[in-house]
Image: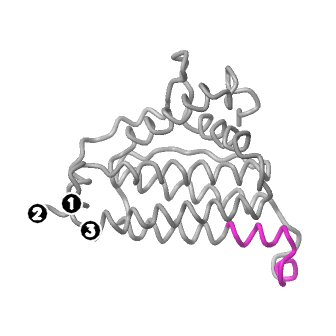
């Protein structure tokens, strides 16, 4: 039986457009869509939006993505060439990371890469490091422990750089598993669903980055 990871890597090369379309057929670039999705998520679930809550949400999503990568690299082959949960968790990590950056007024950008680079377990390790860095700066902002003595005054750009590293690791995993087009469709489906539910206003509203 062919290994699951081998089957994933044999998927067709992705179309890396970086653009989705909304319910009216208007194009929305991927980063803008993620910003609007993160805002729509806040509108749907307005409680627990403090930085620490957002950090916990990001860590949970990173853990769920890591589980999917572990299954892809060590588990048996599933009937589908790409596990839908893998794509969903990629999307959820992006949404949670962008929401954390937005909470601190930082601009980040998701840019798909056309070729595979580091092995997936290296990429998931980089993702864990980046998430840990996000925790460091959120805790620094909260004045926890000796963070201020160690790092001086809190600088939100450090948090922004850590979130960007999260997005870059997700981009690497997206390229490795050749799921850029599947990820774009997953973001598009979520975007349109939130539009239908009224959580994203026509034109995106305040969700613009």
- Do the CB atoms of the residues marked 3 and 1 lie less than 8 Å apart? yes
State how far apart marks 1 and 2 are (Cα): 7 Å
Residue 135 is covered by the magenta coloring: yes
Residue 148 is covered by the magenta coloring: yes
Task: Read off the residue under disc 3.
Answer: 75
For marks 3 and 2, the one nearer the N-term is: 2
Task: Read off the residue under disc 2.
Answer: 1
Q: Main secondary structure of the magenta part?
A: helix
Q: Please, which colouring scheme is shown?
A: one colour
- Do the CB atoms of the residues marked 3 and 2 lie less than 8 Å apart? no
State how far apart marks 3 and 1 are (Cα): 7 Å
- Do the CB atoms of the residues marked 1 and 2 lie less than 8 Å apart? yes
Q: Residues within 10 Å of mark 2 (few under 14, many from 20)?
A: few
| Callout 3 secondary element | loop
Viewer-proximal residue among 168 and 83: 83
Q: Which mark is residue 77?
A: 1
Asked if residue 94 is positioned above or below residue 156 in the image, the reply reads: above
From the image, which quarter does the N terminus lie in?
A: bottom left
From the image, which quarter does the C terminus lie in?
A: top right
Write the start and end of the magenta stretch as one range. Answer: 134-149
| Residue appearing at x 78%, y 60% in the figure | 51
- Where residue 201 sits: x, y (%)? 70, 24
| Callout 2 secondary element | loop
* Residue 79 placement, left or right of 193: left
Q: Residues within 10 Å of mark 3 (few under 14, many from 20)?
A: few
């Amino acid at each position: 039986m062919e290994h699951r990871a081998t089957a994933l890597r044999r998927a067709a090369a992705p179309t890396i457009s970086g653009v989705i379309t909304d319910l009216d057929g208007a194009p929305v670039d991927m980063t803008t869509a993620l910003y609007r999705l993160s805002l729509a998520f806040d509108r749907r679930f307005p409680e627990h939006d403090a930085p620490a809550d957002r950090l916990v949400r990001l860590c949970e999503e990173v853990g769920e993505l890591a589980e999917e990568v572990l299954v892809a690299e060590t588990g048996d082959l599933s009937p589908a060439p790409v596990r839908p949960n893998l794509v969903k968790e990629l999307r959820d990590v992006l949404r949670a990371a962008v929401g954390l950056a937005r909470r601190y007024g930082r601009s980040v950008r998701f840019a798909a890469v056309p070729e595979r680079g580091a092995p997936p377990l290296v990429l998931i390790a980089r993702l864990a490091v980046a998430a840990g860095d996000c925790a460091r700066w959120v805790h620094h902002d909260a004045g926890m422990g000796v963070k201020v003595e160690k790092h001086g005054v809190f600088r939100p750009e450090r948090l922004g750089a850590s979130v960007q590293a999260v997005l870059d690791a997700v981009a690497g995993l997206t390229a490795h598993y050749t799921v850029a087009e599947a990820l774009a469709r997953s973001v598009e489906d979520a975007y349109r669903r939130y539009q239908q539910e009224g959580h994203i206003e026509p034109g995106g509203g305040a969700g613009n980055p």
